[in-house]
Amino acid sequence: MDRRAAEMVGFASNPFSDEPIPMPVSRSFPRHGTVAMALAMALASCSGDSPAGYQEPRGADRVIVRLITEMTSDGRRALRVESDSAFFYAGSNEVKLLNLHGSMFSPDGVAGVTIQADSAVLDSGAQRLTALGNVVARTRRGTSVETAELVFDAPTARLTSDSATVVQEAGGSQRGPCFESDSQLSQWRFCNGPS
């Protein structure tokens, strides 16, 4: 049996032979899932491979492994987010995400920019995503933005960063102390001009 099948199948005892019976397993066993998640988090914290600036989410009321969600603004899809883990907190609109992969959509619904980061905070109340740590945003035309922190504000369809930023285009790369752009990186500028 391959590894993927083993993750999705459990085994029950067979009263007619010594061979176990494979059975589909729901991924939502609270008692076993909580123990498995706690064990996985404990092992991950011992590895020492945490990204720079990473702070382990603590006190989460709910943890979801492999979250995929979308954010809309004025009834249009603005952002699709995928993360390895999501940490939810009671009474808060913020969800902390680990290992972010996402897509930002143009007003006509086309996925034009991808974004990757070590972690992120998704604020559903403010309709804002703050990507943190080794952030890279890329367009289909080849423009890329690299920074330590990048904020996507869905209502205004704007990207901003208060961190040093590198923009790479076909003509070369430019650096600036901070950055702002439309969500498709077609009209960008550095806050104080390129350096």
Image (cartoon, rainbow, N blue to C red):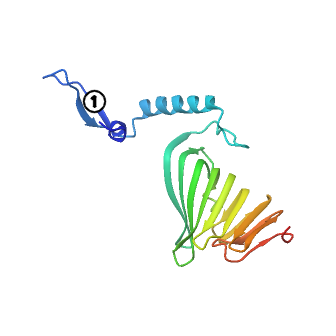
Question: Which residue reaches farthest left?
Answer: 16
In the figure, residue 20 lies in which quadrant? top left
Question: Which residue reaches farthest front?
Answer: 171
In the figure, residue 47 lies in which quadrant? top right
Q: Is residue 127 above or below residue 55?
A: below
* Residue behind mark 1: 11
Q: Position of residue 137 (x, y in %)?
A: 64, 63
Q: Secondary structure at mark 1?
A: strand
Q: Position of residue 6 (x, y in %)?
A: 34, 36
Q: Nearer the viewer, residue 62 or 9?
A: 9
Question: Of the residues shown, which amino acid type is indicated by label 1?
Answer: Phe
Q: Is residue 88 above or below residue 122?
A: above
Q: Position of residue 5 (x, y in %)?
A: 32, 40
Q: Nearer the viewer, residue 194 or 126?
A: 194
Q: Position of residue 8 (x, y in %)?
A: 34, 40
Residue 149 placement, left or right of 114: right
Q: Residues within 10 Å of mark 1 (few under 14, many from 20)?
A: few
Residue 105 placement, left or right of 171: left
Task: State the quadrant of the C terminus.
Answer: bottom right
Q: Is residue 99 above or below residue 182?
A: above
In the figure, residue 162 lies in which quadrant? bottom right
Task: State the quadrant of the N terminus.
Answer: top left
Residue plotted at (63% across, 53% down): 117
Residue plotted at (40% across, 39% down): 28
